[in-house]
Amino acid sequence: MTDAKAGLPRRLAAQGAVSPAYLLITVSTGALLAPLNSTMLAVALPVIRGDLAISHGAAGWLVSSYLIAMAVTQPAGGRLGDMLGRARVFRAGLVAFLVFSLAATAAPNFGLLLASRTLQAVAGAILIPNAMGMLRGSVPGATFGKYSGWNSAIIGATAAAGPLIGGAVLATTAWRYLFLLNVPVVAVALLLATRLRDERDAPRLGGAALDWLGITLFGALLCLVTVTLSTAGAAGARQQALLAVGLVATAAAFAFRQAHTAAPTAEWGLFRKPTFLGASLHILLMNLAMYTTLLATPFFLTEVQHRGSTVAGVLLGGLAAFQALTAPVAGRLGDAVGRRGPAIGSSLVALTAALMLVFSIGPGLSPVFLGVALGMLGIGVGVGFVSASVAAIEAAPKALAGSAAGTQSMMRYFGSIIGVGLLSGLLTTESGDAPDIAVFRLLYILVAVLLGFSVAAAALIRAPSRRPP
């Protein structure tokens, strides 16, 4: 059945008779807030540390808390959209992001800034899965990959531009104005979103409300994972033992809660589907490998090769640029040939890049060679993320599209959290000395192993079953 006036599928007409392109622009404008506020703040950490008189470790929690909050609350954000309507929840997330951005701007001390940043991430966790859920529910299945690819490209380009935007702001004014950049973005997204309507006849997810105890336990678990990994190189035996006990106890409590609650933190049942399991593991492993490389490379360039930060910025910018440029191509390719082949191919390209670094790493490594390897990694990640993300969402019923998007996106952030922790643990020593070349070779070997496992994960992906619209 189609809308007589617009000639659109009924499900799209119910979204307010907007075109797929309009919907893409709207949801991408809102969803880009999360990666923008993740990457543009990174360049401001030294300034914030000096201004608020905090330690390096405390400044690092402005990043870690953001990643943890995003990972923990994205499944809940997707579930809220499935229960209450994705367009409605999306608009609420935009308003919340604006409020907490203003709070961060005015925060008089580190504690309130950290709280505002964490709540910013919670609002961002509402936006991302509901953006993908609306695309899944409204865009015809034959072109879902194309539009998902463009959404990933926009988000990836924003993440790549974040450090440049942050640097430009810091060159002209104070770090607090970084958060005010969100005001016009939210205003545009809210204006565009006024035309979006939730489908009256759309399937809604029933059941119990959110499990706040489970969400809290999950957050505590990820915090302990971060602390355990990041202090592995410097913590004493007693501290490591206490952290291990706390980690095991919290994991057991979380698992028990998930097994006995009517509303689990994430849609764990989806992992019984081989495609969802394989796609989600592929996302986790690819992002873990990418984040480890992304964070390790600047340390290698500055502490081993003694190069300036400009070289690191150019090389990492190339990685992000290739990732963003290949995302739309990956979406169209997946629509034509399926998700499995591009996902496997992406892992093989990224694995080749990692092996290039393993066998060439040394004080005399050419920046050009390093740039080629990072560019190949960006291509692999760009194709892999889109292919696996679309496969995961297609594997779930449409009534669970938001929950599926939130759960697979959670895996992506979980990979980032582990990557940050692993890097900190390997680079941090009790003596405080700079890491030698053997440490970086070990890191790139680890990246290659992870990418090898991602090939096996991608092999689990199957073509989606054809359901009626």
Image (cartoon, helix red, strand yellow):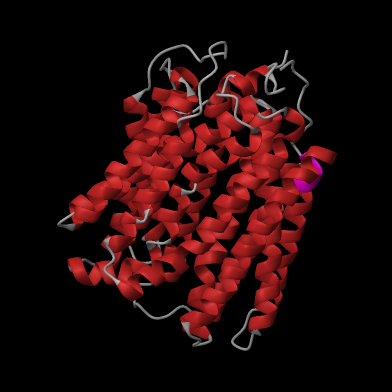
Q: Is residue 125 above or below residue 201?
A: below
Number of labelled discs?
A: 0
> Can residue 160 be seen in this snapshot?
yes
Residue 349 percent location from the top left of the image: 75, 60
Report the front residue among 431 and 168: 168
Q: Main secondary structure of the magenta part?
A: helix
Residue 269 percent location from the top left of the image: 57, 23
Residue 296 percent location from the top left of the image: 51, 69
Report the front residue among 208 and 163: 163
> Can residue 277 be seen in this snapshot?
no
Q: Is residue 158 above or below residue 233?
A: above
Magenta residues? 337-343
Horizontally, is 209 left or right of 290 in the view? Answer: left
Name the residue: 56% across, 30% down: 133
Q: Is residue 338 magenta?
A: yes
Name the residue: 74% across, 36% down: 460
From this viewpoint, which residue is outermost toward the left? 108
Horizontally, is 462 left or right of 38 in the view? Answer: right
Pick the quarter of the image with the N terminus.
Answer: top right
Name the residue: 51% across, 15% down: 205
Residue 365 percent location from the top left of the image: 64, 84
Report the front residue among 247 and 58: 58
Q: Is residue 122 above or below residue 256?
A: below
| Image quarter of residue 396 | top right
